[in-house]
Amino acid sequence: MRDAMPHDAVAAAISLAPHIRAVREELETTRRVPLSLVQAINDAGLFRPYLPHALGGLELPPLTVFRIIEEISKVDGSVGWCTMIASSVSHLSGWLPTDIGRALFGQPPDVRVAGSLRPEGQASLVDGGYRIRGRWEAPGPLYHPRLLFVVLWTGTVANALGIARGAMDAFIELATQARSTSSPTLLRDRALVQTQVAEAEAILSAARAYVLAATGAAWEAVCAGVPDPSREIAQARLAITHGMHEAVRVVDRLFHAAGTNGIYRKYGLERYFRDVHTAVQHAAGLPVHIESAGKVFLGVRPQDLGW
């Protein structure tokens, strides 16, 4: 199968949902993504959405990748996580010389990589700060050095928010079926539960909207060649970290609203609870990013923060 074209990529992610659901129990047992699903994701090009055009990749913008990871994570957080990690690595391939990238990945490219960020380069102390030396080859806004962590972590927050949306869907299904030992009334018919669902929806929708708006503004600023996009980048990085913690707040609220029903595997909510608490441990969720954004808003130079 050829790589999905940009306008097909989100639809391709959505179309994977039945396959992911079909192997969820196998995922729980084996603790790995089945090869059949790996192949399906790879055939759709979703392990390499940021791969440069020069290497035969899709080179998709961040908000398209957000939607890809979000859709997969709604169905299963761990599959979304694996896809997110691979997509981040495909972005880092933009730092490779074209001939080396083609030799590594082949043509058409086959990129299925996992790992963690270990940027290469040298920083030398000079008057007023540091001078950075290294080798970084691909052109275009997607590989702009100031936008690096916004691009990488847009997928990370998409994973967390997708998990939260999946938890919402699982809770609503649970609430139409489940009662409790203390009451014969369905959860969906209880005023307190109705309020908690509405509050969870407001938290999730607001956090998602902030990520989309702030990331979109940072992307547009870099694409337009704004000389100093520091404020837009600070907003995007704040939105990402904030969104991850809000995703946890949503899932926690739903999990507790479910009572003891929430702990049973048959309802699926406990899986989202586990996944979101794992997702927020990613470096993108560290509170220091909130502090750093505040510093930028208060006038600290982003260069002094390593941005």
Image (cartoon, helix red, strand yellow):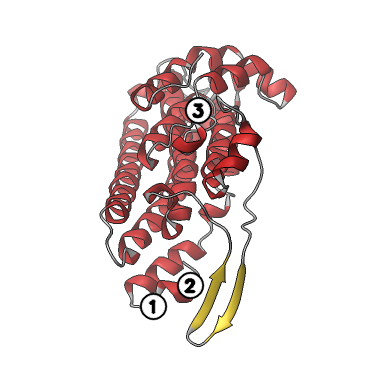
Q: Is residue 186 above or below residue 212?
A: above
Q: Is residue 195 visible?
A: yes
Residue 84 horizontal/vertical position (percent): 53, 37
Local crowd size for mark 1, using a 10 Å CA cut-off: few (<14), some (14–19), many (≥20): few
* Most distant residue in the front direction: 99
Location of residue 275 by image quarter: top right
Structural crowding at the residue carrying mark 3, measured as other residues with C-alpha within 10 Å and reported as few (<14), some (14–19) or many (≥20) = many
Give left or right: position of 105 versus 16: right
Q: Is residue 235 left or right of residue 16?
A: left
Residue 251 seen in the current view: no
Q: In the structure shown, which secondary structural element does the residue marked by tag 1 occupy?
A: loop
Nearest to N terminus: mark 1 or mark 3: 3
The residue tagged 3 is: 46
Residue under label 2: 305
Q: Circle 3 sits in a helix, a strand or a loop, which is it?
A: loop
Q: Earlier in the sequence, mark 2 or mark 3?
A: 3
Labels 2 and 1 touching (C-beta < 8 A): yes
Instruction: Check disc 1 and report the residue beneath it.
Output: 300
The residue at the far right in this view is: 30
Q: Name the residue at 25% across, 54% down.
A: 224
Dots 1, 3 in contact, CB < 8 A: no
Q: Residue at x 29, y 43 (%)?
A: 209
Quadrant assignment, res 64: top left
Q: CA distance from mark 2 to mark 1?
A: 8 Å
Q: Depth check: give the residue in front, 258 or 215.
A: 215
Amino acid beneath label 3 = Leu
Report the Cα–Cα distance between label 1 and label 3.
Answer: 38 Å
